[in-house]
Image (tube, coloured by chain):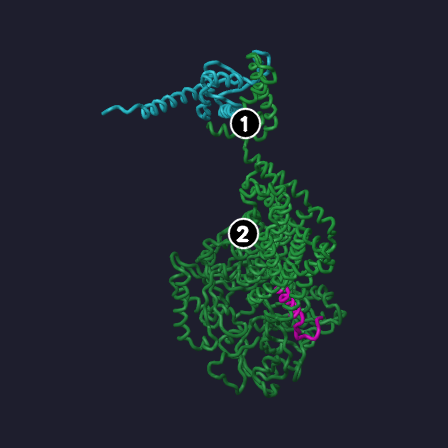
Chain colours: A green, B cyan
Amino acid sequence: MRLLRAAFSRLAGFFTGHRADGDLNEELQAHLEMETAENIRRGMKPDEARRQALLSSGGVTQAAEAVRAQRGLPWLENLVADLRYAVRTLRRAPAFTTVVVVTLALGIGANTAIFSVIRGVLLKPLPHRDGDRLMYLRQSADGPGADNILFSVPEVRELRDGVRSFSGVAEYSPFFGTLQEDNNATRIETGLITGNYFEVMGLSAALGRLTGPTDDGTGAAPVMVLTHEFWVRHFGADSSIVGKRVTVDGHPVSVIGVVQPAPYFPGRMDVLMNMVNSPHHLSAFMVQNRAHRMTEIVARLAPGATAAQARAQVAAIRGRVESDNRAFYDPASHYRVAVLPFKQVMGERAQLTLWLLMASAGFVLIIASANVVNLTLMRGVRRESEVVVRAALGAGVARLRRLLLVENLLLTLLGAALGIVVAIFGVRMLTALAARYSPRAGEIRLDAVVLTFTLGLSVAIALLLSFLASLPREGGFAAAIAAGGRRMSAGFGKNRLQRGLVVAQIAVSVILLAGAGLLTRTMIRLSDVRTGLKTEEVLTMPVSLLTATQLSATKPEEFMALDAAAKATYEDMRREIRALPGVVEVGLGSTMPLTSSQLHLEIKAEGQSLAPGQPVPTAELRTANPEYFRAAGIPLLEGREFTLADNMTSGRVVIINKTMADRFFPHEDPIGKRIAWTGEVLKFTGISGDWRTVVGVSGDTQDGGLDAPPVGAVFMPFAQEPVLFGGLVVRADSNVSALAGAATRIVKRLAPLTPIQNVMTVAQIKDQSVAPRRLNAELIALFGILAVVISAVGIAGVLGFSVSTRANEIGIRMSLGADSGRVQRMILGEGGRLLVTGLALGIAGAFIATSVIQGLLFGIAPHDPVTFVVVALMMAAIGIVACWIPAIRASRIDPAITMRAA
Amino acid sequence: MAEKLEVQQGTLALMILRTLDVLGSLHGYGIARRIEETSKNRINLNYGTLYPALLKLEQEGFIAAEWRQSEKNRRAKFYGLTPAGKKQLAREAREWNRTADLIAAFLAPRREA
């Protein structure tokens, strides 16, 4: 209580100090006068009386200081004084302050922005309950399109029954449906889930209820849980939707709840529905066939179990299953199942890019801080006389150190404040980048943790800067004062630190520039990749007339009717769009050019057998009508196009692409040869394994993206096969994007309940493939340029400082006959040594650093000599310019003036 | 003249409280005089010691200050004991006596066994 009162009173004293000072003075004066009067009464002369009074009481000022110390909070007062002093000092050097604050702001801002992305996408715990115990299972095999082949129901069953380390295994099957409302069709990304999905995932309901075991099986009612994002986006967060019925693909489904916000893998989900919504998923066909892989699985580790135990159990089960079912697991294709933390899977594609950006931003901040150290050191030397005077007046080294710290804190915190503004814009841009790589981009926030990171970073830099600057030792002041306070050590040691920092700056700049150069060249290489199409004036319109449910309808006659109706509608669309002005050709096909359906099936050629140990070849299945190749601009290398005569009643024919032709018929004419689809998967595609005659060979196209090697593709006549996904390819004589509106209207009129999305020109598809890399390259280039500017400032600053401390020496040299050229060469030589050392170290560093980013490069070696030479030349050129400025200043030194001043 | 003693903070507080208890309200000069006299001039109090101590006691609520006219018609700040100060004085005095007895017992000449 007493302590509290005293503390409060002291705090009040801190704020009322000025008023109290007047009181105190009056009180002390009164005391002095009373004592003087007393002395006079004792018979002293007035002057003597006052002198004695002062002597016996001590100085008024010292007393006032002692009372002040008791009254307020001395350390706080000192801090305020230091702060005021620091503000005054920085204001006196606006150029220095601006350079330091701006470079720090850019460095801190970039780090803050990138850290917030890394935290949101890679580090933050998943929103799922005990998210670190969630495991994602991935089955893969060798060959194209086999990175993630999902699981079949029998495979899931084996894992669920056999792995004791999992407390639960949930299935979800990515699917798409059409949400049909009054005259409005929306494509919905759907997960078909087992009832235990939410329990295993550790997600709870935001509204209504989630699915449970009663929602499994053929007898369950069709239900739907909305993802939080879709509920907000599509239903405007209207809670009355829960309990209502909606129509999906023509069937009624009850909305039972909304799940808490969460990221989904592999991508966005709009709704989650129980399996009964897709008859196919519960059909004997799907449930019994081991090769029918359509299911993703997520498992939760049992209490006490580790991921390593789970991995061992999965491996044991798979070893047994694979040897029991040789027909399904071709040994040459190396089937494997990985058990990966769900969180890691979410971030795996973003990882390399984000850490690369973080490292680059970190480098930029380091060299920006190096500049601050340099500039502080220089100012430190210039301020030495001031420091000596302050020391002589009684400021101890600790107090000087604190003053420096306050000054640096002021600089870095100013930088941080500006940096946060930079970060706000940076985060916006980076979120768009991250969304291409990770489903968790929605979780990126500039939150308290990120701001704490920024604050911590700023304070750390300030501390580092304050303790790098060497202050004179306690005893050293006397000597300095004796020397007249003019020149303390222009110390060699201090110089060495400065030079070391400049060399490091140049080296780091070279590394960043090399990275930027490689990524830029990657991007250029990628834009130069030929798509395989002869023109870019092509519009692609994927329109799936048949829903996923209809496609997997099991009754053949029902399916035939749906299929025939869809083909007729497609033909109507084709005819009407063809009639639009400017349209040159319209094609129909299952899959759009430059995109892939990932529908790869095993294939064989007549009369060819596989050598043992050779993986079974696969090819992508596509359909095309007679106009498709001309509309898309895919060149026909050999043979003929499809014609109207290639219909249901005529013989089965195919056109294969060049990759296929080279793979199967390398030394012979493929025309007239026969191939056939084969393998276990074929059985449930509705496509026959009959022999088909090759009638043409088309050129390869970059269907898997510009950076992926072309894969084998087999085109079948649109009229001879099921429509599958379906879509239109429109070619115009010029400016095809202007046609998008009119063409979309036609499609919408003919198929009002079919959602239309992703209408894109070929140029746009191509750009989508290049864009993430362009952003990468631009960001790293930005950091590289920033680094170069910072190091140029560093070189010029350090040399300039060196010139000003050596003005005296230069003056002497010049008066002894050195001409200005000689002086210039001397300074340039000094800078040149730094530059060469920095360049050498930088190139060595870049050699190591660029191998790390190999995965982000395309068409260029990580140690590409051209890039390295260009980068070195660029840095050298800028470095020389930066050296030249102080060199010229040195050569203009007037010996008479500098020597007199010394 | 004997060597003058430096006065310790804790003891000074006790001296001030006791002075105000005996003489009632007093200004800083008066307190200093009285303490010096009571100590038979063995203590020399300067401002730098006295006024911070007064301020500290005031902050702790043991004394209260007000500006009044002095006996010679001069404006001066008078300090007076508060009720809390009276209690504190009693407590401190008791503590001090106990400590003094204890120390005295330790320093007493050794008795022959």
Residue situated furthest front in the rendering: A816
Whole-angstrom CA distance, mark 1 to mark 2, is 72 Å
Position of A732 compared to A209: left or right?
right
Q: If you read the primary sequence from the N terminus, does the residue marked by circle 1 or circle 2 appear first?
A: 1
Amino acid type, mark 2: Val
The quarter of the picture where residue A846 lies is bottom right
Residue farthest left in this picture? B113
**Left or right, A802 with reference to A283:** right
Chain letter of the residue beneath label 1 in the structure image: A
Question: Is A3 contained in the magenta span?
Answer: no
Given residues A674 and A406, the one toward you in this image is A406
Specify the principal SS of the magenta part. helix
- Range covered by the magenta-colored residues: A514-536
Horizontal and vertical percent position of residue A506: 62, 60
Instruction: Give percent across and percent down for residue A375.
Output: 63, 50
Picture layout, residue A593 above or below residue A385 = below
* Dot label at residue A242: 2
Residue B42, compared with residue A409, is above or below; it is above
Q: Is residue A402 visible?
A: yes
Which residue is most to the right? A581
Res. A755 in view: no
Q: Secondary structure at mark 1?
A: helix
Instruction: Decide which of A112, A479 is in the foreground and name it.
Output: A479
- Name the spot of residue A562 as percent of width and height, x first: 59, 70
Residue occupying the point 60% across, 75% down? A710
- Depth check: give the residue in front, A400 or B81: A400
Chain on which label 2 sits: A
Give the residue at mark 1.
A67
Name the secondary structure under disc 2: loop
Can you tell which of label 1 and label 2 is closer to the viewer? Answer: 1
Q: Position of residue A215 (x, y in %)?
A: 46, 58
- For mark 2, does the 10 Å Cα neighbourhood hold few (<14), some (14 to 19), or many (20 or more) residues? some
